[in-house]
Image: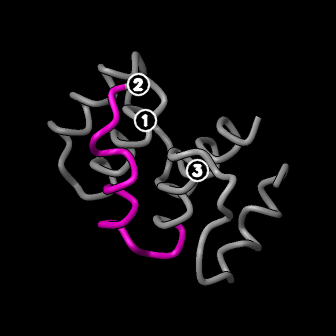
Amino acid sequence: MKTLTEFKASLGSEQPDSGLSAQLKSLWYDGKGDWHKAHAQVDHLEDKASAWVHAYLHRKEGDSWNADYWYNKARQTRPDLSLDEEWEQLVLQFLH
């Protein structure tokens, strides 16, 4: 899977592609509307990439304090984008 279009098309499947990274699996489950499965993919990981996705998920949840904590761990700033735009930005980041 190399493009955002292909990633979005895969949301019609029942399971994410087995070759996806934890970050992309998290974003895949989020794209399917399953916040809890999305969170479970990155909640236990300590790397900056996972922290970035974790931050996005808490932002989506509406927990700004927790989101900012994870953005800081990822060395990112909470973006001034819609959640949909941030989701697409993250997918593109981790596809490449």
Quarter location, residue 17 = bottom right
Determine which residue is flagged by label 2. Answer: 47
Q: Residues within 10 Å of mark 3 (few under 14, many from 20)?
A: many
- Please state the horizontal and vertical placement of residue 9, each as a whole percent of the image: 76, 73
Q: Position of residue 81 (x, y in %)?
A: 50, 43
Amino acid type at circle 2 is: Asp
Cα distance in 3D space between marks 3 and 1? 10 Å
- Element under label 1? helix
**Label ID, residue 26:** none
- Of the numbered discs 3 and 1, the one sitting upstream in the chain is 3
Q: CA distance from mark 1 to mark 2?
A: 6 Å
What residue sits right under mark 3 in the picture?
24
Q: Is residue 35 magenta?
A: yes
Three-letter amino acid code at disc 3?
Answer: Leu
Judging by the rendered image, the residue that carries numbered circle 1 is 50
Please state, as top left, top right, bottom left or bottom right, where the C terminus lies in the image.
top right
Q: Residues within 10 Å of mark 2 (few under 14, many from 20)?
A: few
Distance from the alpha carbon under mark 3 to that under mark 2? 14 Å
Task: Give the camera-side residue of 54 and 19.
Answer: 19
**Is label 2 in a helix, a strand or a loop?**
loop
Tell me the crowding category of disc 1: few under 14, some 14 to 19, or many 20 or more residues within 10 angstroms, Cα based.
Answer: many
Instruction: Identify residue type, mark 1.
Output: Ser
Point 30% across, 48% down: residue: 59
Please name the residue shown 52% across and 45% down the image: 23
* Residue drawn at the location 65% of the way across and 52% of the way down: 20
Q: Position of residue 46 (x, y in %)?
A: 33, 27
Callouts 3 and 1 close, C-beta under 8 Å: no
Query: What residue lies at 35% left-to-right and 42% top-to-bottom?
Result: 54
Q: Is residue 66 above or below residue 75?
A: below
Magenta part of the protein: which range? 31-46
